[in-house]
Image (cartoon, rainbow, N blue to C red):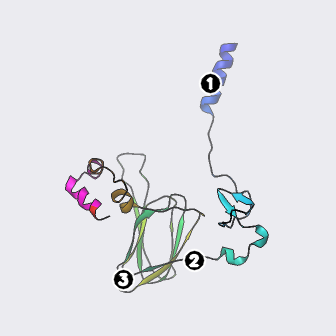
Amino acid sequence: MAIGFLLFTILALASSLAYASDPSPLQDFCVAVNDSKATVFVNGKICKDPKMVTADDFFFSVRIDYAPYGLNPPHTHPRATEVLVVVQGTLYVGFVTSNPANPNMKNKLFTKILYPGDVFVFPEGLIHFQFNVGKTKAVAFAGLSSQNPGVITIANAVFGSNPPISSDVLTKAFQVNKNVIKHLQGQF
């Protein structure tokens, strides 16, 4: 009987599913403030008193101006999805999928040429870029789905870290000569 119960318990534990996700919001919104006297504290942020919040607290814009042939280099937002709206010019945009489960497959690049009025979504955590392919300036507005989206510019992080990543590691990772790595690290 005890062996049967033990076997049942082991099978139940082995076949149980695990679920993980961000917790549900505790309130409708948190307008973060730098006020140590504020009494509302959510998700590591001190929040403005909800009775003092106005519509202006929800207005923001991230305007990106691209020079002709200007580039927002490959980067990622580890905690946010980005929505980009082009209002002027022509942008070549794209993102790369995460590493496939099958080692024989390659990461897939999704690209699109955007014109004024076009909208593009960059999924959370994926490496993406924007490049002005026009001869005139381009303007876009971006929105991010997190109060703390983070940003990692890939080349800066890999070749410009302090202290630097060992050239032995980078030589092996990129399968290039050590002089190439030293040159790239010297650019950052």
Amino acid identity at mark 2 = Ser
Quadrant location of the N terminus in the rendered image: top right
Q: Looking at the image, do the residues carrying marks 1 and 3 touch, with CB atoms under 8 Å apart?
A: no
Q: Earlier in the sequence, mark 2 or mark 3?
A: 2
Question: Residue at image x 48%, y 63%?
Answer: 151
Which quadrant is home to the C terminus?
A: bottom left
Q: Mark 1 or mark 3: which is in front?
A: 3
Which residue is denoted by mark 3 in the rendering?
68
- The residue singled out by tag 2 in the image is 61
- Name the kind of residue labelled 1 in the image: Ile
The kind of residue on which mark 3 rests is Pro
Write the start and end of the magenta stretch as one range.
Answer: 171-185
Q: Residue at x 35, y 85 (%)?
A: 135
Q: Residue at x 47, y 82 (%)?
A: 139
Task: Tell me where residue 143 appears, x and y as whole percent.
Answer: 56, 71
Residue 7 appears in which quarter of the rendering? top right
* Residue 183 or residue 89, whichever sits in front: 183
Where residue 122 appears, x then y in whole percent? 49, 65
Reading the image, the residue beneath label 1 is 10
- Compute the Cα span from label 1 to label 3: 63 Å
Total tally of numbered discs in the picture: 3
